[in-house]
Image (spheres, helix red, strand yellow):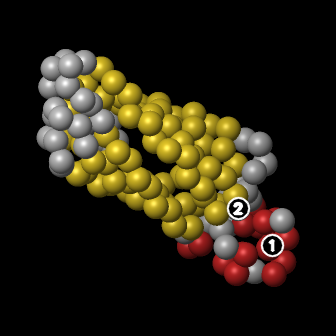
Amino acid sequence: MSKKCFEITVETRYLPEDSNPAQSQFCFAYFVTIKNSGEVGAQLVARHWVIEDAAGSRQEVRGLGVVGQQPFLSPGEVFRYNSGTRISSPLGSMHGTYICVSDDAEVFEAAIPAFSLRVDAAELGADLSAMLH
C-alpha cells in the first residue's frame, strides 16, 4: 500500500476594509498551501470546514473542491489558493478536512490543522479593543 499524505498550512489576514466591528462583522482572508508529500498522486475532491468564533457560533461548510477546482497533485506538487470567511467576533478559529482520492482509487482524508482568526487590538481601535479581552 502506497503512502498517501497531503500536508496543509494556512496563513490568515484580517480584512478591515470588508469588516464592520460596530456591527460584529469581522472578515478574514486565508491562504492555503497543500503539498502532496505522499508517494502517489491524488485529487482533492471535497472539503469540510468548521468555523467558530469567540461568541460561541459554529458554522460547518461542506462542498466539492476548493475555489471551484478539484486539483490533482502528483507527489511533491503544491497547490495554493485563498478564500475568506466572516465571523461575528474578533477572535475565532477554523479547521477541517479535505476528502481526497488517490491514483490507486483509495479515498483518504487530509486534516486541515486548526488555525486562528484574530484581529490585533491596534486594528480595532481603543473603543473596541476590549472585545479581545
Residue that numbered label 1 is attached to: 128
Residue 54 can be seen in this image: yes
Q: Is residue 93 above or below residue 111?
A: below
Q: Which mark is first along the chain, 2 or 1?
A: 2
**Left or right side of 92 for 3:** left
Using the rendered view, name the quadrant where residue 28 is placed: bottom right
Residue at 75 percent of width and 80 percent of height: 125
Question: Is disc 2 surrounded by few (<14), some (14 to 19) or many (20+) residues within 10 Å?
Answer: many
What residue appears at the point 50 percent right and 37 percent down from the top-left corner?
96
In this picture, residue 12 sits left or right of residue 47: right
x 30%, y 20%: residue:
107
Quadrant, the N terminus: top left
Give the secondary structure at mark 1.
Answer: helix
Q: Which mark is residue 90?
A: 2
Q: Position of residue 128 (x, y in %)?
A: 80, 72
Report x, y in % for residue 11: 46, 61
Q: CA distance from mark 1 to mark 2?
A: 9 Å
Q: Nearer the viewer, residue 43 or 6?
A: 6
The disc labelled 1 sits on which kind of residue? Leu
Specify whether 81 is left or right of 12. left
Residue at the spot x=62%, y=37% of the render? 59
Observer-nearest of 61 and 6? 6
- Look at the image and tell me whether residue 71 can be seen: no
1 and 2 marks in contact (CB < 8 Å)? yes
The residue type indicated by label 2 comes to Pro
